[in-house]
Image: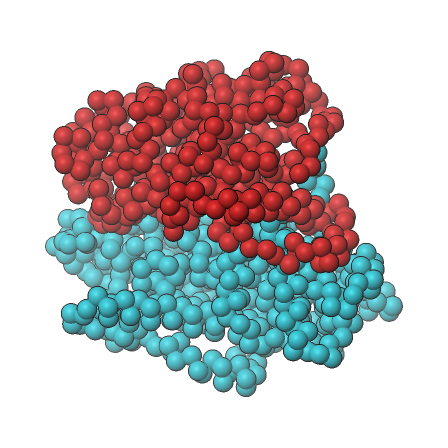
Amino acid sequence: MKRRKIVQYGSLFAAASLISVGMNSWVVKAIAGSNNKKLIVIFLRGAIDGLNVVVPYRESAYYEARPTIAIPTPDDEGGAIDLDGRFGLNPALIDIMPFWQQNNLAFIHASGSTDPTRSHFEAQDYLETGTPGVKSTTSGWMNRLLTISPQNNPTRAVNVGNNMPLILKGNMAVANLNSANAKRQLPIDRSAINEAFDRLYSGQDAVSLAYQEGRKAREIVMKEINKEMMEADRGAPTPINFVKDARRLARLMAGDAKTQLGFMALGGWDTHVNQGSTRGRLTRNLKPLGMGLAALIKELGSVYQDTAIVVMSEFGRTVAENGNRGTDHGHGNAIWLLGGNIKGGKVYGEWPGLSESALYQGRDLAVTTDFRTAIASVLSQHLQLSGSDLENVFPGYSANRLLPLIT
Amino acid sequence: MKQDRSKRGQAKQFYRPSMKTAKSATADSQLIHSIARLSFGPRPQEIETIRKRKIKEYLAIQLKPEAIAEPSLLTTELNKLKTLSMSPIALFQEYTARGRGKKISPEARKMLRKKRRGLVREAFQARLLRAIASQRQLQEVMVDFWFNHFNVFAGKGLTGMWIGNYEEKAIRSNVFGSFRELLGATARHPAMLFYLDNWLNTDPNSRGARGRFKGLNENYARELMELHTLGVNGGYTQADVVSLARILTGWGISRRDRQGDGSGFYFDPKRHDFQDKVFLGKTIQGRGKEEVEEALDILATHPATARHISYKLAQYFVSDRPPESLVNSLAENFLATKGNIAAVLNTLFTSKEFLDPQYYGNKFKTPYQYIVSIYRATNIEKPNLRQTYGMLRQLGMPLYGCRTPNGYQNTRDAWLGPDSMMRRVSLATALARKYLKTEKSHNPNLLMATLGDRFSSNTLAVINSSKPFLKTALILGSPEMMYR
């Protein structure tokens, strides 16, 4: 394992941000090499139906709009699990209820993008670039986060999945952990082969640089994964890939790879048809998500105390169900937050209600909290980013009303 | 370490014309460039063969695939795949419980599911065999392009059962024809109707509204505008999405052969909304399925569509960030020819932008293009299917496996990453080893000649100084091989 190096960093804005942060900041601690604060983002691609995750069970309008797919009230058998007397949790998420009880789990309801698009692809891009409405942004906000205290550690940020998502694209190196099959040795792991390819890809062009980062990251990741194999799986192994991937990410975060930023995406939420109530497509996907989150936290161990986990999706879905026991593309959604120092047990955000006049364009949950406010609050209070750092992560956004999300 | 990736941006120029006069050297690099873009990469001796003709001739031939004879081995192999010629209705009857029309046991149901997966395998096999061995290379390249443009996902319900037929009837038959016909063929195909849920789309107040056909479903209407035609900035509103969804009510599938052509398409007037609709500022008179044809006419000839398609073609064939001048001239041509795809392609391939050397060798291959180009260069005509599928999956591009309707991207940003490079050079090594087992007399210099001898001095130096067993691996895994 190579020691991380403090690397010279010449750009003006970074120098400025280094001066402006306090002594407790993520930046300073990262440089001092002490235990770092960590952030994991889990992106639910396809627009999860937030109203059936954090259920506004006091609203009669909710039940009127969803005759066949509403989640019953906590008083009904198999209904929502009461959270705060106003909202209930989808019972398929029972696995994360303990964190609510420990005040480690919070939701920010009626949150989302300030851009009105209902296109999956556009909306996902905006959440990932952190610049809703601006198409020209080519880097992701998680990558820009790395530029605040650049280090020569290719596994400092890790994506779990086959391809690098926009949220992690940019100037800084990010490692990729292929979902499933990650344990298998590849020809490139053999020295007789990689010596020759190393010479082939010794240049400074895009392909060579990607190759070089891949080699560095692979050495670290393989070491960590081998350790995992030897220690054998703790707890019952599960066939669900998300749970496996979540565990693997946790190993990198807790181990020598010193991963500080993690990202995973999970698909299958575009429930136009047969979304179902407490049974159906949404429930089938929520169950492994809840289990995966619980496994992730368990595997993080003591590192969980320093970790914040954000779960988000590009937009919400229509308040009313459509003709096929499903929902179409909507607007406001709920952001989930988990972490050892999250001020949880609370549903944040101004609830606009579901009365017809309160709906966005007469059909969707309105957005009362900009998603950037939710994330900026975590970055500012958890990672101790300064105001000017936040401006670099979310250009054009002014963080003036942050939420008190961290204890 | 701060790395400025914007500076990494420019791909190296890999085409090194050999020792000839400047003029013929230019012509030669143009030719190699054209082969790289109009096909899945050169096969042994192919460059020499095409050199004897002119580029113009090569292009003209490629745009008329029906006149190109196919290799008999390919035809024989394709003929073995019996399910490819089955109609959607025949497939439905043979491969679903409902189609069988009687109650069947859970075990039999499971068997049918398994058999349906076999259908996707046959479609995959046919696609791969053609991409490798077909002489109609541009047709197969366009199948790749249009399939992704009109993407459907094999894993969603019955979509996979129809995916081979969809590719053959809706896509491959229309790749060079009129865009309106291509659009109409996808709009009527059960694979698309199922995948984007329009088969369920129903006027909630109609007499046919019952059971699962209860109300509107916007899914297809939205993607039809956002992805298939106008593009996301094409100027439509949420109200237009709802209008188009209403126009599309009752536009669906039948399990009986109602059209008499086995297509499975059926318009159900009992579930249609017969009121007038305002769509893109125009009043569409409520009158049934002709409304859909009218809406498709509007969409297919819309300037926003012309631009959207032109941009995507220019991006696929010229550069990740295509020159504006080219997009404009293609869009003009698209409108002037009412969406004649062959005409637009001809404009593209003869444009000064396409032939501008700054774009040569600058398109990073998608995993599919990369793997097929290796098979072509090494003359592997019948690769191991399971292994190929596995490689595509590991590289994040399983064929027919793109869940989302936008299809796979073809830009470098989408596919280049540290992990994907590890996997590419690893699979190049594995395939080289396999290749060397079958071709004992293999000569790396011939492989380099097949690829047009377009290697940088560094690549050549590394190859020349490596052990024989690694030479082939290094050629197939070289930076030059990553680009087309």
Residue A87, image quadrant: top left
Identify which residue is drawn at 63% across, 65% down: B430
Q: How does the figure colour the protein chain or chains?
A: by chain
Picture coordinates of residue B355, whole percent (x, y):
70, 60
Picture coordinates of residue B256, whole percent (x, y):
21, 71
Q: Nearer the viewer, residue B442 or B267?
A: B442
Q: Colour of chain B?
A: cyan
Residue found at the far front of this picture: A231
Identify which residue is drawn at 30% across, 66% down: B113
Identify which residue is drawn at 58% across, 22% down: A26
Q: Is residue B307 visible?
A: no
Q: Is residue B466 left or right of residue A184?
A: right
Identify which residue is drawn at 71% across, 30% down: A5
Q: Colour of chain A?
A: red
Report the quarter where the C terminus of chain B lies. bottom right
Q: Is residue B406 left or right of residue B113?
A: right
Picture coordinates of residue A294, whole percent (x, y):
38, 36
Using the image, determine if residue B298 lies above or below residue B264.
above
Report the quarter where the N terminus of chain B lies. top right
Residue A189, image quadrant: bottom right
Q: Is residue A75 left or right of residue B95?
A: left
Q: Nearer the viewer, residue B467 or A362?
A: B467
